[in-house]
């Protein structure tokens, strides 16, 4: 297995409600930005992470479509789907293709175009990450599923409503420094607690938004990057993935993300690192409670103590382990298939020292955690500055 | 276009709570599967789920799917039935204020939703506080 480096990164100009841009335009803009950042004139292979172009815009066969519109036919291109972990899973496939020696230069992009359908139809498309016949059938929604987990966590560990709010507040604070974010402005705990209830106890400001956006990276062997990279080198130290039951009710512990934990453990082992070695992380805050659960599953905090992390400032910029300096899914936005790739981009920028106002001092080792559904799949990567 | 076959094939599970118990390790699969989740054995015997249990967690859906608009807000939760199987079900005929983790419930056959213009009637079980 060869060492793999991130040669280039690119995001489309801004995430949000991109009325003028189609699915293919959004992806190609991000991909071209990544190719330019990498300074390559060709790629050997491409992976496209996207949860549900079929339900959102009626389009499938994205590998083919994006290779076509990027002008890189006849390069092999494949769509990867793992619900909200589609981007992270696509990145992992790209990593494996380079690490194995199968290809040298691989483009990995993630995209989602979510605003061509009504809110109701978008909710339906997202619910497809759950068990349609035995969860969604009974009327549980995605905020509802995470609300079920939140209630267990609050009852068992005493996690408070305010502690959940602090996650959203922290991520918005970070996002206010990110010009690419969908909602680049700060909010307060009062704002969160006063926002409309979606599924008790989660309110609208506990929930990541509907977003159009794309993100792309170019991967190559580290040895090649040493010769041709125009940017400070970033190596993919570890790539790991795990699955769990699709239905929340099939999990042995309703307030624990086992797939995240297993992927995290495998990643730490592959990287030769422990949680203490992680300087910063991008985790999957699809809902405020999700960040709390992810921190515990990644052993970045003790099990049950996740609620204290944002509230105490531990995970804020300037804190012990800044989490979601990009603004997270909450403030940056959550174009589902793009999220996993965007997490890698944020860590890459931090490790390159090019995160501007969001820069974490002396950032050398970063972790990304992407997950699908209620944690039925999770992908964890560890990146290091070389 | 709503598809009746999709609902028809789940009738034994939704109407009669039919499940499958692995003859190797005793794990109950609901719905039935081809391979046991616990021990991967392929041999099962038919069983029926208990219709009483307790609430493990619940939420009140305030923003729900359009086909349940008339019912919103409604309670839904994870219920652990006698025998250990857990299911997702709406909690009907209840006062939201009185819902609690650990509350005992009983399953009742109810209409769950209607699919599409043709209004295929979809049934199943909801739980009701005991």
Image: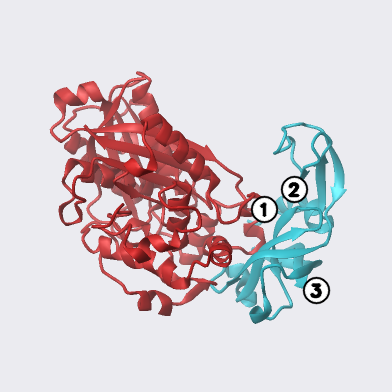
**Which tint was used for chain A?**
red
Q: Is residue B120 visible?
A: no
| Mark in the foreground, 1 or 2 | 2
Residue A17, horizontal then vertical, whole percent: 32, 62
Q: Name the residue under label 3.
A: B130
Is the N terminus of chain B in the top left, top right, bottom left or bottom right quadrant? bottom right
Q: Which residue is drawn at 75% across and 48% down?
A: B30
Which numbered circle lies on residue B31?
2
Q: Name the residue under label 1.
A: A133
Q: Are marks 1 and 2 in contact (CB under 8 Å)?
A: yes
Asked if residue B101 is positioned above or below residue B7 in the image, the reply reads: below
Chain painted in cyan in the figure:
B
* B108 on left or right of A263: right
Asked if residue A69 is positioned above or below residue A106 in the image, the reply reads: below
- In terms of depth relative to the viewer, which is nearer, A129 or A48? A129
How many other residues sit within 10 Å of disc 2, few (<14), some (14-19) or many (≥20)?
A: some
Image quarter of residue B39 = top right
Q: Can marks 2 and 3 be said to lie on one chain? A: yes
Which numbered circle lies on residue A350?
none
């Amino acid at each position: 297995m060869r060492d793999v480096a991130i040669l280039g990164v690119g995001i489309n100009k801004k995430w949000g409600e991109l009325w003028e841009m189609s699915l293919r335009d959004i992806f190609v803009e991000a991909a071209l930005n990544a190719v330019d950042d990498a300074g390559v004139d060709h790629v050997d292979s491409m992976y496209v992470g996207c949860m549900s172009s079929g339900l959102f815009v009626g389009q499938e066969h994205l590998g083919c479509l994006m290779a076509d519109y990027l002008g890189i036919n006849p390069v092999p291109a494949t769509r990867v789907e793992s619900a909200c972990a589609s981007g992270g899973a696509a990145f992992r496939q790209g990593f494996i293709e380079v690490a194995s020696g199968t290809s040298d230069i691989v483009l990995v992009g993630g995209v989602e175009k979510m605003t061509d359908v009504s809110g109701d139809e978008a909710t339906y498309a997202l619910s497809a990450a759950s068990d349609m016949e035995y969860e969604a059938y009974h009327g549980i929604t995605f905020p509802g599923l995470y609300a079920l987990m939140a209630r267990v966590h609050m009852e068992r560990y005493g996690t408070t409503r305010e502690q959940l709010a602090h996650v959203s507040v922290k991520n918005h604070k970070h996002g206010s420094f990110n010009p690419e974010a969908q909602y680049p402005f700060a909010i307060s705990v009062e704002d969160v607690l006063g926002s409309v209830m979606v599924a008790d106890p989660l309110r609208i400001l506990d929930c990541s938004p509907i977003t159009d956006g794309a993100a792309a990276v170019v991967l190559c062997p580290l040895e090649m990057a040493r010769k041709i990279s125009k940017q400070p080198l970033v190596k993919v130290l570890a790539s790991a993935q795990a699955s769990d039951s699709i239905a929340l009710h099939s999990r042995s512990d309703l307030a624990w993300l086992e797939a995240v934990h297993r992927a995290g453990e495998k990643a730490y082992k592959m990287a030769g690192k422990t949680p203490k070695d992680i300087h910063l992380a991008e985790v999957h805050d699809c809902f405020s409670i999700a960040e709390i659960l992810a921190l515990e599953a990644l052993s970045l905090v003790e099990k049950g103590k996740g609620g204290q992390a944002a509230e105490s400032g531990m995970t804020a910029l300037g804190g012990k382990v800044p989490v979601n300096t990009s603004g997270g899914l909450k403030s940056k936005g959550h174009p589902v298939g793009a999220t996993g790739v965007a997490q890698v981009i944020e860590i890459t920028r931090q490790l390159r020292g090019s995160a501007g106002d969001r820069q974490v001092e002396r950032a050398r080792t970063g972790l990304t955690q992407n997950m699908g559904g209620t944690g039925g799949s999770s992908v964890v990567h560890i990146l290091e500055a070389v | 276009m709503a598809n009746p076959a999709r609902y028809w094939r789940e009738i034994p599970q939704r109407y009669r709570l039919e499940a499958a118990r692995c003859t190797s390790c005793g794990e109950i699969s609901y719905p039935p599967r081809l391979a046991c989740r616990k021990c991967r054995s392929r041999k099962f015997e038919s069983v029926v789920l208990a219709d009483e249990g307790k609430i493990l967690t619940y939420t009140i859906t305030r923003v729900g799917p359009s086909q349940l608009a008339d019912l919103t807000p409604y309670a839904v939760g994870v219920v652990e039935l006698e025998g250990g199987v857990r299911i997702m079900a709406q909690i009907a005929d209840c006062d939201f204020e009185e819902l609690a983790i650990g509350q005992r419930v009983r399953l009742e056959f109810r209409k769950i939703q209607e699919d599409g213009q043709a209004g295929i009637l979809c049934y199943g079980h909801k739980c009701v506080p005991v």
